[in-house]
Image (tube, helix red, strand yellow):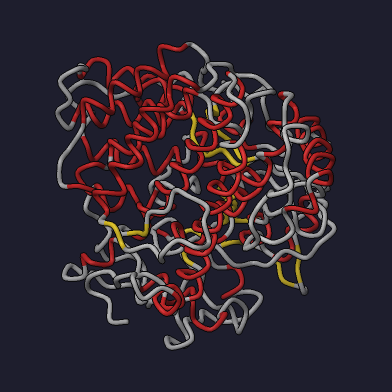
């Protein structure tokens, strides 16, 4: 059991039990029974009361991960003889034929705004407490988390309602432009930076530090031209430099160490992570999505895996066999835990990265044959399967931001024209990542002549697979409308660079506007 989850769970349970009479219903007048005697006072109480803000973050690796990843070129989720059709939602994600009633579109929206509402609710409690440095820092942390949630929603849906108070008597919010949401996020982060902790420790792990906020600002400004029409390359470099020059982080010597089931505060590269635990902090089920049924015998799992998500061939082909990061893919002959060839239902499990062929286009079905359709596609085990999983839940913490991404963001901004960095710096940053991927092979390093934006785009794919960056990268590099596997190019459908506002949200709030291009 990870000690920080155990401590956090016990603190949260104890404090919330004491407050339970006044927080069982979100639509009640919250915490009206509070007096100065039962408001939080100690650091432990402050941290515990913020628990729901961070518990909500676990949905990032569920509904939001599905929304951002399933329509990108990283992955395809075909039907395999009836398995994984799920009403056609994965087919629609692949072909970019989602609608305002799409399940994944609606689930991610609901997750994000529930999380934002939770932040507003907790902030309304802290606003009533007496002033202190601890209060100031805690409120800055919650506001930074709220800005992060708004960033995720703005990136996915563009135009959003902006709500910063917890008041069920307020008028229903109206849609604000993407540019206005962008400005709110930038202002909120810039104003709260000074109050956030500079520590990198078990105490600040999974909470927003000053360096997390700088990283989020770098990411926000990296995509500023997409969000507002105005690039902000210099600001990307400024905030990336703040993280790099802090000296708090360094590249892991082993790329995969930061994604293992025992990852956590001791890892040197992650800047912001979401803790998971098989029993106390559930929701990391990625291993189930990707592994073949027979891999239960490979990894000593107590559950049957689901055999669904696999790499698109063109994406898999980006990886050189000598690239250490290629080890995240399972392909070819598979083996059980004893090293013997893996057999499932009497069939030798040999995964074919290129074995996709539709047998039923309307059902997005590549067939349910154990020796054909169910063997198609390389499978990703970057987050190494946790043999101690419980009821389909793994204990790998999910890395949201890490130093390698900061290096790549700074390098890209320089190549795009930032005036406060040099090409030499960009080459050095990317080569630190390449040197880890190709140890001892100087021929794989870039020079000022060979490092260009296409190389950055590819390097981001190689380095950041399944880290919820690919859709945003494809849009920024203008590849979102490209053809991929079964999907033809759709150059006229640039409006699909944002998802539709869910129909349920429109039905509930008449002040919301549909996103342009979608018929609701």
Q: Nearer the viewer, residue 317 or 125?
A: 125
User: Residue at image x 37%, y 25%?
Assistant: 407
Left or right: 328, with 2 as reference point: left
Q: Position of residue 7 (x, y in %)?
A: 81, 32
Is residue 165 placed above or below 500 in the rendered structure? Answer: above
User: Residue at image x 36%, y 76%?
Assistant: 510
User: Residue at image x 55%, y 63%?
Assistant: 309
Q: Nearer the viewer, residue 54 or 130?
A: 130
Placement of the C terminus among the 4 image quadrants: bottom left
Q: Position of residue 219 (x, y in %)?
A: 35, 36
Q: Position of residue 14 (x, y in %)?
A: 84, 40
Is residue 29 placed above or below 276 in the rendered structure? Answer: below
Is residue 335 placed above or below 53 in the rendered structure? Answer: below
Q: Position of residue 366 (x, y in %)?
A: 51, 79
Left or right: 407, with 21 as reference point: left
Q: Nearer the viewer, residue 12 or 92?
A: 12
Left or right: 232, with 23 as reference point: left
Placement of the N terminus among the 4 image quadrants: top right
Quadrant of the image occupied by residue 276: top right
Quadrant of the image occupied by residue 258: top right
Left or right: 343, with 242 as reference point: right
Quadrant of the image occupied by residue 114: bottom right
User: Residue at image x 78%, y 45%?
Assistant: 16
């Amino acid at each position: 059991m990870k000690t920080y989850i155990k401590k956090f769970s016990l603190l949260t349970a104890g404090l919330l039990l004491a407050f339970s009479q006044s927080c069982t219903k979100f639509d009640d007048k919250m915490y009206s029974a509070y007096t100065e005697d039962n408001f939080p006072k100690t650091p432990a109480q402050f941290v515990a009361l913020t628990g729901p803000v961070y518990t909500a973050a676990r949905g990032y690796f569920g509904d939001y991960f599905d929304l951002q990843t399933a329509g990108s070129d990283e992955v395809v989720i075909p039907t395999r003889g009836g398995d994984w059709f799920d009403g056609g939602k994965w087919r629609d994600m692949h072909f970019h034929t989602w609608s305002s009633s799409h399940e994944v579109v609606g689930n991610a929206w609901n997750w994000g705004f529930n999380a934002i509402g939770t932040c507003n609710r907790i902030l309304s409690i802290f606003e009533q407490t007496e002033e202190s440095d601890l209060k100031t820092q805690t409120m800055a942390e919650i506001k930074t988390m709220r800005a992060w949630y708004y960033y995720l929603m703005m990136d996915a849906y563009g135009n959003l309602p902006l709500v910063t108070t917890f008041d069920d008597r307020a008028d229903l919010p109206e849609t604000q432009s993407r540019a206005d949401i962008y400005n709110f996020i930038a202002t909120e982060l810039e104003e709260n930076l000074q109050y956030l902790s500079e520590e990198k420790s078990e105490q600040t792990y999974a909470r927003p530090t000053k360096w997390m906020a700088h990283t989020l600002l770098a990411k926000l400004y990296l995509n500023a031209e997409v969000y507002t029409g105005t690039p902000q390359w210099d600001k990307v470099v400024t905030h990336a430099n703040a993280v790099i020059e802090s000296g708090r982080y360094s590249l892991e010597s082993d790329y995969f160490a930061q994604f293992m089931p025992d990852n956590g505060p001791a890892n040197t590269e992650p800047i912001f992570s979401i803790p998971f635990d098989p029993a106390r902090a559930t929701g990391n089920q990625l291993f189930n999505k990707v592994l073949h049924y027979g891999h239960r015998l490979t990894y000593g799992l107590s559950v049957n895996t689901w055999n669904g998500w696999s790499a698109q061939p063109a994406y898999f082909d980006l990886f050189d066999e000598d690239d250490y990061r290629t080890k995240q893919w399972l392909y070819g002959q598979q083996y059980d835990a004893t090293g013997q060839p893996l057999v499932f239902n009497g069939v030798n499990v040999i995964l074919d990265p290129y074995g996709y062929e539709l047998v039923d286009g309307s059902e997005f079905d590549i067939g349910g044959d154990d020796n054909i359709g169910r063997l198609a596609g390389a499978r990703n085990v970057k987050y190494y399967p946790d043999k101690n999983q419980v009821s389909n839940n793994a204990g790998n913490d999910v890395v949201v931001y890490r130093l390698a991404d900061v290096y790549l963001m700074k390098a890209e901004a320089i190549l795009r024209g930032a005036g406060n960095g040099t090409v030499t710096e960009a080459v050095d940053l990317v080569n630190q990542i390449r040197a880890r991927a190709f140890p001892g092979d100087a021929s794989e390093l870039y020079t000022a002549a060979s490092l260009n934006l296409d190389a950055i785009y590819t390097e981001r794919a190689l380095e950041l697979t399944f880290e919820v960056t690919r859709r945003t990268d494809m849009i920024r590099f203008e590849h979102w409308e490209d053809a991929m596997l079964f999907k033809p190019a759709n150059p006229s459908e640039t409006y699909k660079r944002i998802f539709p506002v869910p129909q349920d949200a429109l039905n509930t709030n008449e002040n919301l506007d549909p996103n342009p291009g979608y018929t609701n």
